[in-house]
Amino acid sequence: MKIIFATGNKHKFEEVKKLFEDTDVELLSLNDFSVKPNIIEDAETFEENSLIKVKTVFDFYQIPAIGDDSGLTVEQLNGAPGVYSARYSGANATYESNNKKLLKELEKFPQPHKAAFVCAATYYDGNAVITAVGRLKGEIIKEYRGQNGFGYDPIFKPEGYEKTLAEITLEEKNKISHRGKAFSELKQLLIEKGIIDR
Ligand code: IMP
């Protein structure tokens, strides 16, 4: 069956596509369509934002949708950047400018800078709404390490790991990451409910 992943982010798409490889799902992304809906994710929680994404995409294409909202929460910053992770350093934010701002904000705090990635993954087909949440605890380190992944990966070291998320493979990241956990659970729920097959 066709499911649209409500994202234009190629990195996210590669991660999630891999997780659905052993199912009958043909996963599409917004990059497969020339006309795209305008998604206004203005809620205060990851769960609500992921629901906004899938509802907007389902209403627009009338094809079942999965979507996620994810971000980084840092203890010493009272949970920031949180739902604002993508736009942390302003409207024209890049991964680089976000990382720079985060390291600057953390300069005044002692290490370790405890943090967690959070991902809410939601499925919607005009009827059923199914959501799963995944978390990955770790810490923000001062230097950039690794070339893989995206976003805050080069400065995030998962708990119990010496490497950053940008120094491990996509397969390894999927086993431990917030997105890997959320979408693995969502996949399981979709199989149990008979919506998709292995
Ligand atoms: P979203 O696309 O609205 O969910 O925003 C997610 C933002 O959170 C991204 O732009 C990244 O800045 C950050 N983020 C989410 N997941 C990850 C990840 O797996 N690694 C690094 N950064 C992430």
Image (spheres, rainbow, N blue to C red):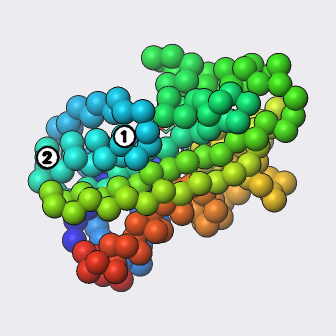
Secondary structure under the numbered disc 2 in the rendered image: helix
Query: Is disc 2 surrounded by few (<14), some (14 to 19) or many (20+) residues within 10 Å?
Result: some
Secondary structure under the numbered disc 1 in the rendered image: helix
Does label 1 point to a residue whose CB lies under 8 Å from ligand 1? yes
Q: Nearer the viewer, mark 2 or mark 1?
A: 1
Does label 2 point to a residue whose CB lies under 8 Å from ligand 1? no
* Picture quadrant of residue 94: top right
Q: Residue at x 48, y 68 (%)?
A: 184
Query: Is disc 1 surrounded by few (<14), some (14 to 19) or many (20+) residues within 10 Å?
Result: many
Is residue 70 left or right of 26 when viewed as pictured? right
Is residue 122 left or right of 120 when viewed as pictured? left
Query: Which of 77/12 is in front?
Result: 77
Is residue 78 left or right of 128 when viewed as pictured? right
Residue 70 coordinates in the image, percent (x, y): 49, 44
Whether residue 15 can be seen here: no
Q: Is residue 21 above or below residue 174?
A: below
Residue 114 coordinates in the image, percent (x, y): 76, 41
* Picture quadrant of residue 104: top right
Type of residue at label 1?
A: Asn
Q: Residue at x 51, y 16 (%)?
A: 90
Label ID, residue 17 = none
Is residue 173 left or right of 66 when viewed as pictured? right
Type of residue at label 2?
A: Asp
Of the numbered discs 2 and 1, the one sitting upstream in the chain is 1
- Quickly name the residue at label 1: 49
Label ID, residue 59 = 2
